Amino acid sequence: MIVQGGSTYILTNKNFTTLYTGSTVDINSRYIEHKEKLIPNSFSSRYNLNVMVFIKVFSTIQEARFLEKYIKGKSRMWKIELIKKGNPNWINLGEVLDTPKLEEHMNLYDDRDFGFV
């Protein structure tokens, strides 16, 4: 289980047509909420967004929320390029949350990718 202060993530659907950016203090539970559509009227439920294609873990939720807002302000093409840098095959990272595969994904990014430098 990932233990952290916060995570920023991007979800999409099986056809990769819609993107959703969010942040949370508990990425494992949040992924289950999206996957199981536990909030039926939410944006992610309506558009079947249950493929997690990007995750960045932080020591605080404030950092995660900062990155969420930063990503939301970017264009769709920028977001696609960000996803492709760390997840070129668009695998569902929600299914590898507790594995080394997730670490490999996150290690492909540096602070410049997120405007932190």
Image: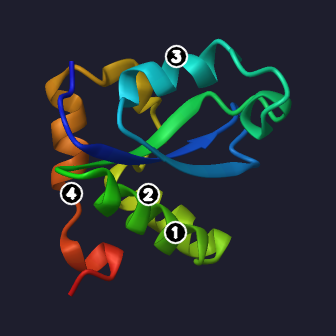
**Secondary structure under the numbered disc 2 in the rendered image:** helix
Residue 48 % position (x, y) = 76, 28
Labels 2 and 1: the sequence-earlier one: 1
Q: Amino acid at mark 4?
A: Leu
Labels 1 and 3: the sequence-earlier one: 3
Distance between mark 2 and mark 1 Cα atoms: 20 Å
Labels 2 and 4: the sequence-earlier one: 2
Residue under numbered circle 3: 32
What is the basis of the colouring in this image?
rainbow
- Evaluate if marks 2 and 4 touch, with contact meaning CB atoms under 8 Å apart: no
Q: Name which residue lies at 64% across and 49% down.
A: 20
Q: Name which residue lies at 31% across and 22% down.
A: 96
Q: Name which residue lies at 53% across and 49% down.
A: 22
In front of the other: label 3 or label 4?
Answer: 3
Residue under numbered circle 1: 69
Distance between mark 3 and mark 2 Cα atoms: 23 Å
Q: Amino acid at mark 1?
A: Lys
Distance between mark 3 and mark 4 Cα atoms: 25 Å
The label number, if any, that marks residue 51 in the structure image? none
In front of the other: label 2 or label 1?
Answer: 1
Label 2: how many residues lie within 10 Å, few (<14), some (14-19) or many (20+)? some
